[in-house]
């Protein structure tokens, strides 16, 4: 059985709908991610994932490589 967890990320450079769509798509490519939603207005995204196969470091690394540095909000 999976261990569902929700991560909240603060994303630098998330300025418009195109950025939000790209960030969402990149996050949804990460193994174990069930759902991602990025908001340009908030500069944040929410990610629902399997906590056993996806950790927040994977998420922030994928975004940094795409040009969107991010940090997990605790």
Image (tube, rainbow, N blue to C red):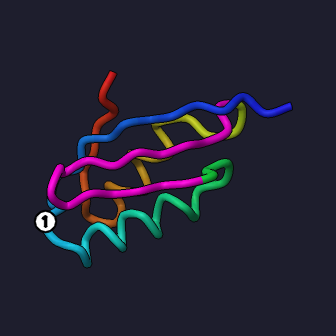
Instruction: Kindly give the residue lying farthest to the right in the view shown.
Output: 1
- Report the residue at 24% width, 42% height from top: 10
Query: Is residue 29 placed above or below 59 in the rendered structure?
Result: below
Location of the N terminus (image quadrant): top right
* Percent coordinates x, y for residue 72 in the rendering: 34, 33
What residue occupies the far bottom of the structure in this picture?
A: 18
The verdict on residue 29 being magenta is no
Task: Decide if residue 30 is on the left or right side of residue 44.
Answer: right
Quadrant of res 52: top right
Q: Position of residue 19 (x, y in %)?
A: 25, 71
In the displayed structure image, the side of residue 34 where residue 70 appears, left or right: left
Taken as a whole, is the magenta stretch helix, strand or loop?
Answer: strand
**Residue topped by disc 1:** 15
Residue plotted at (46% across, 66% down)? 26
Q: Is residue 72 above or below residue 11?
A: above
Q: Secondary structure at mark 1?
A: loop
What range is drawn magenta here?
Answer: 35-51
How far across and down, in percent of the image, does residue 4 sit?
66, 33
Q: Nearer the viewer, residue 31 or 3?
A: 3
Query: Where is residue 65 shown, x and y percent of the image?
Result: 36, 61
Which residue is found at the position 16% from the left and 71% from the top? 16
């Amino acid at each position: 059985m999976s261990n569902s967890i929700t991560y909240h990320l603060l994303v630098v450079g998330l300025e418009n709908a195109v950025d939000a769509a790209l960030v969402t798509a990149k996050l949804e490519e990460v193994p174990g991610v069930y759902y991602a939603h990025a908001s340009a207005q908030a500069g944040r995204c929410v990610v629902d994932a399997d906590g056993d196969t996806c950790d927040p470091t994977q998420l922030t690394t994928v975004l940094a490589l795409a040009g969107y540095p991010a940090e997990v909000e605790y």
